[in-house]
Amino acid sequence: MNQSAKQIPTDPMKVKIRGMDCGSCAITIEDSIRKLPGVQQASVSFTTESMEVTGDVGIEQIESRLKELGYKLASNDEPVKTAVAEHRGAVGFMHFVWEQTQLRVSLFVTLAVLVGLPLLSGLQAVLGIEPLDILFTAAVLIAGAPVFIKGMRAIIFAHRITIDLLMIIASIGALAIGATGEAVTVMLLFMLGEGLEAYSAERARDSLRSLMSLQPQEATVLQAHDDSHDDQHSDEKKDCGSSCNDRDDHKHAHEEHDHTVILPIEQVAIGDRVLVRPGERIAVDGEIIKGISSINQAPVTGESVPVVKQVGDEVMAGTVNGEAALEVRTTRLASDGTIARIAKLVEQAQAQRSPAERFIDRFARWYTPAVVALAALVVLIPVYGFGQPLLTQLDGTTGWLYRGLAMLIIACPCALVISIPVTVVSGLTRLANLGVLVKGGAQLDTLATIEAIAFDKTGTLTHGKPRVTHIATEDCSHPAGNDEDCLSCDELVTIAASVERSSEHPVAHAIVQSAEQRPGVGALAHADSVLAHPGKGVSGELSGGRKVVVGTGDLFNSSMNGWGGISRHAEDSRSNGNTIMYVAQNDAVIGYIGVQDEVRDISRTALQQLGEMGIYKVMLTGDHEMAAKRVADTLDSIDEVKASLLPADKLEAIKLIRQQHGPVAMVGDGINDAPALATADIGIAMGAEGSAQAMETADVVLMQDDLSDVPMALRVARKSRRIIKQNIALSLGLKLAFLGLAIPGFATLWMAVMADVGATLLVTLNGMRLLRETK
């Protein structure tokens, strides 16, 4: 086949899978799906119960293969409701067990054994037979049938030796040597362990589903009274008094009366007015247009103290209204709202494996077959090489077959396989609940290694909403800061704003806003041929062919007319920490505009916390050095300031910081920050007011632009890394300890399975500790 005939890769097919109860299931499904004709790649996430398949393969083939393996396909939008969402602790686990057919059968078998023991003991005394062996064998076969089928399917369709097969070998081997009591104990404890593992994973999944449950499914939409309600006129007219004598009078009297309609949130459009009553959960992302109330944002951002919101303030879906009714204008569709974006990004993040997860998956693929081979050698070498007993002797000497079976059970990689994904998912989900979106396990792991953080200034350390503090021209004679009635300044800001109105930069917004608020300024002119100069300013053309340039000193030539006087005059404003934007018309500098931004209140606290964590902190800004120094002095926690940087300069600064201090993160909000965000080991974007480019490029998104979330995210990432190391050490340590007991013959089969179940439970609970993290 020639190059032109090669198949073009298609977009991945995303599906949901039901029936996985351990991390090994995901590996089995991956291996089997990859063997289907046309499949190029398959990736299965146990924690999210999802799979992505790339290649020329139909959904029918995938569904058929899943059925062969014992799993089933589910719709991506299929609602999932389990007992885990409604119950916790032992009650939740028992409900979960009851929902699982396989576990329910095991439960009945266990009860049957317990009830039957005293009865069969009596029969043994009367009839002289061994009914207990019969009962235990039947229990193993009944409870173990699903495990046996699952293990055989994995061998046939995925060519994998799985944990299920190890348990079957161990149980049948125990029956063969007469250890029937231990055989049934092994099987029932294994089923219990699988149930605990599945339950724990379901708890982690439920934490993601709880994000979606924050958003109400219906909204109370306000609609203006119109002609469609005229059929009610005759009834309403009775209450209108003598002034309502005809249809037009009645309509006029009620023109301001809205009626409410309950709509599914999917039908609420941008611009719709939504009524939020006291105590209700806000259904949409929007802007308050009527009312003032305290908003409890804890369900979405983790903030413990309600925030007072009034007209003009933004509110998020999922937050809870306080004491007063609000009228909210919808600004985002439900599918694009805060809750939907968080849930989508978190699910995508959970499906991405960290380097440690990928390593453990590869390790598990050869580890289990290696364990079977090693167990066989443990039996064969002593027996045939040194004449040791195969079966347990009458004097109590443990046979090598028994020891090999114990080794099979102990070596099961359940705890190792589940230890990392549960920890990663718990960390990602908890951070999302607290308003921080980390885009994957790899990013969470890298975040834990960060030694230095670079911060953009405008919109990150400051509010990003600068205001004009001074305007000056060659013709004005007013004192600095007292330019309210200067006609020359009015003309200058009008010219600048006419060009800047096409820019999205915060300084441009400040100039336009200042022009609109000045009484001497009329309607802004339309500018043509507007061109942005990244990191420097903007230029354009006004009526009459007037060429206008607005920007920093880097955009101007010192030989231009008017530059000398204006630039000297601007130095006083610059020394006070103002950002200076010069204005030129027809190649002559005609004045300057001083702009200043205020530092965020939370910035100082966040920087202090990072300093206590040993993080080196750098400010990167395109602003001039005096303005940057003013902000740094106000914060009092910046270790280094790099000013007057273009986007390319920020990128080089990131590389230099990495060389000097190690892994570096970049925190920014604008388009200009995107290259630096991409270059840093971890890019952190301000998500509430930051640009779409910054959010797309970043590895971490702060949904509330709260810089205190940076040290919190770093703390959770570091804790996640510690827990992963603990879990790996715990999993391997317990196995090595019991292997040391099994080979000499000191460990029994039930002790071996208890060690496996116990290790799985311990690492799972340890990983889920991250779900309790707070701000």
Image (cartoon, rainbow, N blue to C red):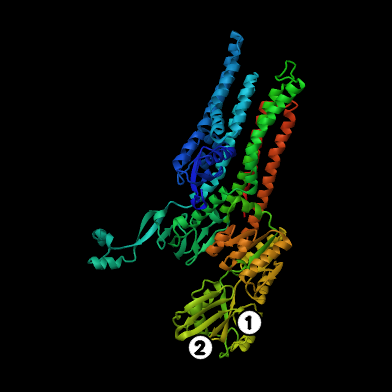
Q: Where is residue 358 in the image (x, y as percent from the top left)?
A: 62, 45
Q: How crowded is mark 2: few (under 14 residues within 10 Å), some or many (20 or more)?
A: few
Q: Kindly identify the amino acid type of the residue bearing the numbered disc 2.
A: Leu
| Residue 412 seen in the figure | no
Return the residue at label 2: 487
Residue 174: x %, y % from top left? 64, 22
Most distant residue in the left direction: 246
Front-lying residue, 72 or 482:
72
Q: Which of 588 and 478 is in front in this view?
A: 588
In which quadrant of the rendered image does the C terminus lie?
bottom right
- Is the residue 537 above or below the residue 564 in the image? above
Instruction: Please determine whether, in this image, residue 358 is positioned above or below residue 230.
Output: above
Mark 2 to mark 1 CA distance (whole Å):
20 Å
Residue 154 x, y percent position in the rendering: 56, 33
Residue position marked by numbered label 1 in the rendering: 573
User: Is 64 drawn above or below residue 444 in the view shown?
Assistant: above
In the image, what residue occupies the spot 53% across and 57% down?
A: 297
Quarter holding residue 254: bottom left
Total marks in image: 2
Determine whether 598 is above or below 146 in the image: below
Residue 47 in view, yes or no: yes
**Residue 524's x, y, as percent?**
45, 80
Front one among 515 and 721: 721
Taking the image as shown, residue 615 lies to the left or right of residue 479, namely: right
| Label 2 secondary element | helix
Amino acid type of the residue that numbered disc 1 sits on in the rendered structure: Ser
Q: Which mark is residue 697?
A: none
**Image quadrant assignment for residue 107:** top right
